[in-house]
Every structure is written in structure tokens, then in C-alpha cells.
Amino acid sequence: MDKKKLQQTAVEVRKGIVTSVHSAKAGHPGGSLSATDIFTYLYFEEMNINPENPKDENRDRFVLSKGHTAPGLYATLAHRGYFPVEDLLTLRHIGSVLQGHPDMKHIPGVDMSSGSLGQGFSTAVGMALAAKMSGKEYRTYCLCGDGEIQEGQIWEAAMFAGHRKLDNLVVIVDNNNLQIDGTVEEVCSPYPIDDKFKAFGFHVININGNDFDEIDAAFKEAKNTKGMPTAIVAHTVKGKGVSFMENQAGWHGKAPNDEELALALEELGKAGDALC
């Protein structure tokens, strides 16, 4: 793992998030920014993928179950080479393939259309089962939100995955502790998240989801875990990387204005410069 290169890439992904949401005048920057380091690690270090052959049947799969954080996925895909970075400015525009939620029919690199919370994880479980049944070696990764796991369908899927011992499946919970209406504790507490997944037969790893050393160790541990699926509970900061967005529920689904965009890009620019 080239930690500095991943950190630099994450800064560029964060720039893509804030610029695209600003251009759209709508979107979800907070959860996209909290998950940026996870997105970056998956697409630039962990997954067996090829942007020149996005439908390779042997590729690893990724499902963004919390589909509203599509700006984070799109910025990552663009910087990974699936489509031009300039296309990020067309987010949510009429005629653009970059819709408010991921669309597998039109966006290269998107393995599953998502947005209805809870459903993406079920699809990921199905993908992992399909690999087992067909003797394929690909792995399936799924990112869920900590607010999203209030959905009952998440736990039905978890029960099935644990029962079928899907050790080719990794679910990551972006645990930034904030959802649209406030803290997840206040709205409908999912805690303790780790114990719940353990009860369903998962190997569970708790990490700082904004620290590449811990992210790297967790995914290596997941790959070495046999006979059970893995849940990585990634403790993150909502709005990570843009100080005035950090830990603010109000930035769950709000676009920055011109002045706020300038401030965000200035901060991110300084963060990038510090890594050079």
C-alpha cells in the first residue's frame, strides 16, 4: 500500500464530491466525504477491477447500498478512469448519466442501481452467493450507512449471509453517527452495531474509517477470514476533509454555495499540498 498516494487520491476525490454537488445544486456531500477513504482504498488498492473492461465477469463487485452518496462513488470512478473527471460537473443535470443515485445501465463501473435504502446489501449477498454457486473467485463489497441499517431488510440479508457462510462478502458500515434528522442514536439507535453483526455470524472488525493503515489492515483481515462473512464497522467523520461540514447533520443533503465551495476547495488544496 502506498499510503501517501492513497491520501492524495482521496483529496482529489473529495474535490470531485464538493464540485459536483455544487454544480448540481443538490446532493449528499456529508456521507460521501465520510466514506471517501473507503471508496479510495477499495478502487485503488483492494478490488480486482479494470476500467477498460468494466463488465469482466471475474471482476470484484461493489454495491453502494446507501445510494444517495453517489457523488463519492462517481468521483472515485472518474479518478479511477471509468469516465472523464470533467463529467462530474454534470451530476443530476438533464441528459447526464450521473443521476442522483447509481445507475448500472448507463454508468461504467456501477455494478448495481441503488438508492432504496436496505436493498443494496441484499443484492450484494446475492452476488456473493452467485460466486459461490458458480465457482468464481470474485469478492463482493457493500457499503451501508449507519442510518440505513435501521432498515429491517439489512438484517434479513445479514441472517442469510451468515447462514450461508459467505466468506467472499464484506459489508462496510459507514458509522459517522449522523443521518438526515440528527444522530443515529436519537433517531433510532442501531448500537451496538458490532454485536448485532456478530449475532448473525459475521466476523466483525472495528476501525477508524478515515485512517488508511487501519483500513488496509481490516481488508487484509477480511480476506484471510474463512467460513464467515466480514463486517467492517468504519467509525468516520461526516463531512471529513471540509472543516465546516464535519460532524454537521445539516450537510447530509445540501449543496455548498459559491463561497462555501471556494472555502472547501481551499482547504482541500492545502491538504493536498501538505502531502506533496
Image: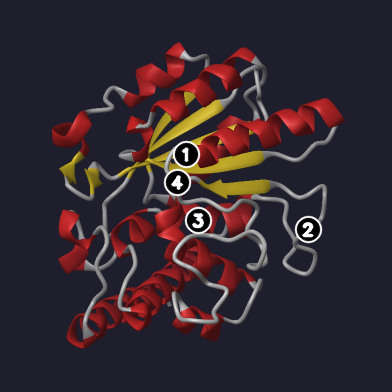
Q: Nearer the viewer, mark 1 or mark 4?
A: 4
Determine if residue 218 is in view: no
Residue at 36 percent of width and 83 percent of height: 23
Determine if residue 244 is in view: yes
Q: Quadrant of residue 199?
A: top left
Per the image, the residue denoted by label 4 is 116
Question: Which class describes the residues within 10 Å of circle 2: few (<14), some (14-19), or many (20+)?
Answer: some
SS of the residue under disc 3 = helix
Work out whether residue 274 or residue 109 is closer to the camera in this orientation and state it. 109
Q: Residue 215, how many percent across, how many down?
A: 47, 44
Return the mark for residue 21.
none
Q: Residue 267, how many percent across, how many down?
A: 25, 77
Q: Residue 190, how many percent across, how many down?
A: 28, 27
Residue at 64 percent of width and 76 percent of height: 83
Per the image, the residue denoted by label 2 is 55
Q: Nearer the viewer, mark 2 or mark 3?
A: 2
Q: Is residue 110 above or below residue 265?
A: above
Q: Is residue 262 above or below residue 203?
A: below
Per the image, the residue denoted by label 3 is 39
Return the mark for residue 172.
1
Q: Earlier in the sequence, mark 4 or mark 3?
A: 3
